[in-house]
Image: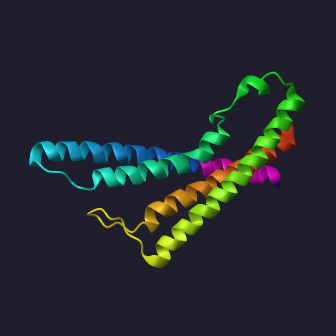
Amino acid sequence: MMRSFIRAAERLATLFGWVAGLLLLATTSLILFDIAFRKLAGRSTFISQEYSGYFMAAMVYMAAGYTLLKGEHIRVGLVRERLGPQGQRIMDLIAGALGTIFATLLAYALFKQTHDAWVYGTRSFLPSRTPLVYPYSSAFLGSLVLLTSFVAFTLKSWLGKEAES
């Protein structure tokens, strides 16, 4: 059961990693289009800065779980690398538990923000008047993937070599 959860979390994180990559392409395309539009038509689209910001925030949250499971988050290896396998496992368990607590609090805060934007109909103050529930919900979904990834990381640390079979 735990190994199934780990595999499902890895697949979910990979999917969201790909979505983050597509958002990077969309951001690049939007900026290039705005540059070309400014050059050819002499004016801006007025949404490229706003939507680039939304896409960048979504990318960060959506790629966070993938980055964690690939071992690419920032680690302070100075202490960890000097420990034996058992010490590294214990350190990973502690880091995983703390990360799970942090990701839970983050997901809760982003849920509240998204819910409030939905209930109150909050919109951007910029010319697009974008309903903020959409960019907020992408951050919330990304935080859920990060939470799932931290739980999977902790389970992998707990199971040790058993998780790889």
Q: Quadrant of residue 35?
A: top left
Residue 4 covered by magenta stretch: yes
Task: Tell me if residue 145 can be seen.
Answer: yes
Residue at the limit of the structure toward the bottom, as seen here: 119
Q: Is residue 49 magenta?
A: no
Residue 81: image location, x then y, percent: 78, 23
Residue 102 left/right relative to 37: right
Q: Which residue is at a point 41% across and 71% down the rendered structure image?
A: 122
Q: Residue at x 69, y 52 (%)?
A: 102
Quadrant that contains the N terminus: bottom right
Q: Is residue 150 left or right of residue 27?
A: right
Q: Is residue 126 above or below residue 88?
A: below
**Residue 5 higher or lower than 75, as above or below:** below
From the viewer's side, name the closer residue of 150 and 112. Answer: 112
- Residue drawn where x is 61% and y is 49% of the image: 13
Q: Furthest residue to the right?
A: 86
Extent of the magenta region: 2-13
Say how the picture is coloured.
rainbow
Tell me the quadrant of the picture where the C terminus can be found.
top right
Q: Residue furthest front?
A: 125
From the viewer's perspective, tell me whether residue 72 is left or right of residue 101: left
Q: Position of residue 22 (x, y in %)?
A: 43, 47
Up the image or down, 129 lies above or below 4; here it is below
Residue that lies at the very extreme toward the left in this rendered image = 41
> What's the residue at 62%, 54% (across, down)?
145
Main secondary structure of the magenta stretch: helix
- Residue 148 percent across, percent down from the top left: 69, 54
Residue 8 shows up from this direction: no
